[in-house]
Amino acid sequence: MNSQDYIALDYQYGAHNYHPIPVVISKAKGCKVWDPEGREYYDFLSAYSAVNQGHLHPHIVNAVKSQIELVTLTSRAFHNDKMGPFLKKLCEYTGYEMALPMNSGVEAVETAIKAARRWGVEKRGIENGKQSIICANGNFHGRTLSAVSMSSDPDSYINYGPYVPGFIKIPFGDAKAVCDVIDENTVAVLVEPIQGEAGVVIPPDGYLLDLRRICTEAGILFILDEIQTGFCRTGRRFAWHYENARPDIMCLGKALGGGIMPISAIVADHEVMDVFTPGTHGSTFGGNPLAGAVGIAALEVLEQENLDERAFKLGERFRQALRNTKSSHFRLVRGKGLLNAVVFEEGFDAYPTCIDLKESGILAKQTHGNIIRFAPPLVMTEDELEEALEKIIYVLDRA
């Protein structure tokens, strides 16, 4: 079968809830992928930052091979010999006292919401059913009903009502707007440190630190969704490290699974995590032994290869190279580390440019019509980046 055959099967038997770039990936290694015809591409999406360690990193693959012949799933009805070591490693890496493992990123967000609401009742005495969480316009926290109830994007929420109550939306990047809506029923502020799906929107300097201060003074929780920005993507272990704005709860996912399988978690200290007791939250697959082995290996790669430093250095080079893009439609390039976006003028359709990039051997995806996100695996070498930049600049100059 060729690429067109596979695409036809997808369209015939799959729900049409995505509009993918017309390329079929049949093999991957490091920062490169190949289609069934053998054409080679640089991956500049990294599965939305789930492949920070590169495709099929040998250390992570070896962890899978070792574990898969022993035990892969036990449920949480029993202990297994990988979950504890994994949680210990994750807590040491993040600097928190406790972790609660789940699977997909949005499960981590849902877990954080439940933790905050329960904390509000049990620690602050708020009447159950009146708890509220402040979130930001332009956010993307996933696709569950709670997540889309927070969304300001009609494509995400239209016709899915009735929506989950208890969310107050304010402008992203405006700390004062948070102060204006905090009341006696507020339990938390939940934001992304950088809005990835919105087009790599970076808030003003000091925004996260202001939110940290506001939450502390109000006696409410500060929650950061670092699912896309975390694990070295922005040039730091976590984006909040740029301002030392430590959240009370951090939502994690994507690269925690090393590009192998879905692994997510929230991390917090005892004062928050202790609201969960047996039977109040759970997951059949969360913390399974295969995930534990993969998660440990994924974190080891991030540490041993200093991928935060590499992302910072290569990101600086990427933005410097694209600042002088010659297209008359080009407006700016922005980002941190290797989470970047090229923004064209309003009304510009970037999808054809993504097709041109594909034809040149670069896989990237537009968001919100006029923005292209560029986020390659963090294991990319300087030589590979320079080779990719030549192709990207050639296409963007002609957009």
Image (cartoon, helix red, strand yellow):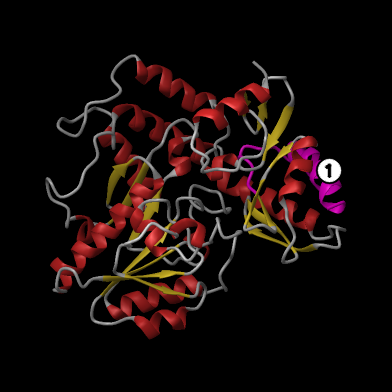
* Frontmost residue, 195 versus 240: 195
Above or below: residue 148 compared with residue 124: above
Above or below: residue 352 compared with residue 30: below
Q: Position of residue 260 (x, y in %)?
A: 47, 30
In the image, 120: left or right of 317? left
Asked whether the viewer can see residue 306, the reply is no
For the N terminus, the quadrant is top right
Crowding at mark 1 (Cα within 10 Å: few <14, some 14-19, many 20+): few
* Frontmost residue, 296 versus 147: 147
**Where on the picture, by quarter, is residue 85?**
top left
Magenta stretch: dominant SS? helix
**Amino acid at pointer 1:** Glu
In the image, 71: left or right of 327? left
Q: Where is residue 59 in the image (x, y as percent from the top left)?
A: 49, 26
Query: Who's the residue at 36% across and 82% down the image?
Result: 181
**Where on the picture, by quarter, is residue 169?**
bottom left
Q: Position of residue 308 (x, y in %)?
A: 56, 48
Q: Position of residue 56 (x, y in %)?
A: 54, 26
Above or below: residue 360 compared with residue 215: above
In the image, 98: left or right of 325? left
Pointer 1: what residue? 390
Above or below: residue 371 compared with residue 43: below
* Frontmost residue, 186 versus 144: 144
Asked whether the viewer can see residue 324, the reply is yes
Query: Is disc 1 placed on a helix, strand or loop?
Result: helix
What stretch of residues is rendered in magenta?
374-399
